[in-house]
């Protein structure tokens, strides 16, 4: 299987050039190659792919299907290089995702969340989470995007937030209302008075940790 590691590197490089991050697929595919090596397999076969995808036995059907789907993507790429590589059938481990129903918070519920943040352990932590909740409510940005914001991503002069490494690893600019700009400046001013700026570049930080590590 000497050519499989290089083929995997080429496959990941190609997909990432198209905007995919592939952190989990890379880890899974490395594990799959280790499985093939231990089995003495020279290339991908449906039998080996299915056996690996079903490990361990106690995992649910959705996880098995996801593991096999990751192998399918790589196998289709590999088949262009190795005519002996097999692509597992799409319906070998069928599973349909159950999409969660979106929930829209009412204005009263958002106010209640902001009020509930007052019960946190310190004044700075209170204002951190209140500002975070308010920013999510008025911009509609994803929570992961908000907690990954650094101070350099906030342009108070032009009223903009720069969202980096968003979906498909893209970057976009998010315009802010003047009241939102004022709220963020007020929060960051309070952080500066607590001398937290030198400890973390993240916008949302409280005393000894960034919010991104606590959420």
Image (tube, grey):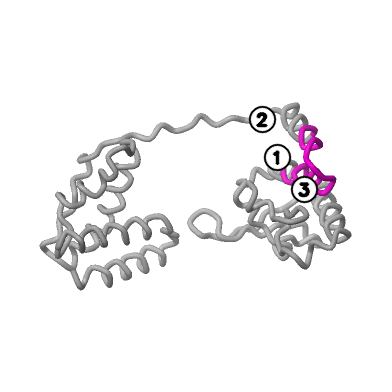
**Residue 94 disc label:** none
Circle 1 SS class: helix
Whether the residues at callouts 2 and 1 have beta carbons within 8 Å, the answer is: yes
Residue 215, percent from left and from top: 63, 46
Circle 3 SS class: helix
Residue to which mark 2 is pinned: 105
Is residue 140 on the magenta stretch? no
Between residue 10 and residue 31, name the one nearer to us: 31
**Mark nearer the viewer, 3 or 2:** 3
Residue 182, percent from left and from top: 85, 51
Give the distance between the C-alpha atoms of the residues marked 2 and 1, in whole angstroms.
Answer: 9 Å
Q: Which residues are magenta?
A: 115-132
10 Å crowding of disc 1: few (<14), some (14-19), many (20+): some
Q: Residue furthest left?
A: 84
Give the distance between the C-alpha atoms of the residues marked 1 and 3, in whole angstroms.
Answer: 14 Å
In primary-sequence order, the first of circles 1 and 3 is 3
Between residue 174 and residue 133, name the one nearer to us: 133
Give the distance between the C-alpha atoms of the residues marked 3 and 2, in whole angstroms.
Answer: 20 Å
10 Å crowding of disc 2: few (<14), some (14-19), many (20+): few
Q: Residue at x 70, y 57 (%)?
A: 161
Between residue 60 and residue 185, name the one nearer to us: 60
**Residue 137 disc label:** 1
Residue 192 as seen in the image, left or right of residue 5: right
Residue to which mark 3 is pinned: 128
């Amino acid at each position: 299987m000497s050519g499989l590691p290089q083929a995997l590197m080429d496959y990941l490089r190609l997909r990432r050039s198209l905007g995919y991050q592939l952190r989990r697929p890379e880890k899974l595919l490395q594990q799959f190659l280790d499985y093939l090596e231990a089995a003495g397999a020279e290339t991908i076969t449906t039998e080996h792919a299915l056996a690996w995808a079903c490990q361990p036995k106690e995992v649910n059907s959705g996880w098995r299907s996801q593991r096999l789907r990751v192998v399918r993507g790589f196998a289709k790429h590999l088949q262009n290089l190795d005519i002996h590589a097999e692509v597992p059938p799409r319906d070998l481990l069928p599973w349909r995702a159950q999409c969660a129903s979106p929930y829209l918070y009412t204005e009263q519920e958002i106010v209640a969340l902001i009020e509930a943040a007052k019960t946190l352990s310190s004044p700075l932590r209170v204002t951190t989470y209140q500002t975070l909740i308010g920013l999510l409510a008025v911009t509609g940005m994803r929570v992961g995007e908000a907690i990954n914001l650094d101070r350099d991503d906030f342009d108070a002069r032009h009223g903009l937030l720069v969202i980096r490494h968003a979906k498909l690893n893209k970057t976009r600019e998010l315009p802010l209302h003047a009241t939102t700009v004022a709220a963020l400046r007020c929060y960051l001013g309070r952080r500066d008075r607590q001398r937290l700026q030198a400890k973390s570049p993240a916008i949302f930080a409280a005393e000894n940790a960034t919010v991104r590590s606590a959420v």
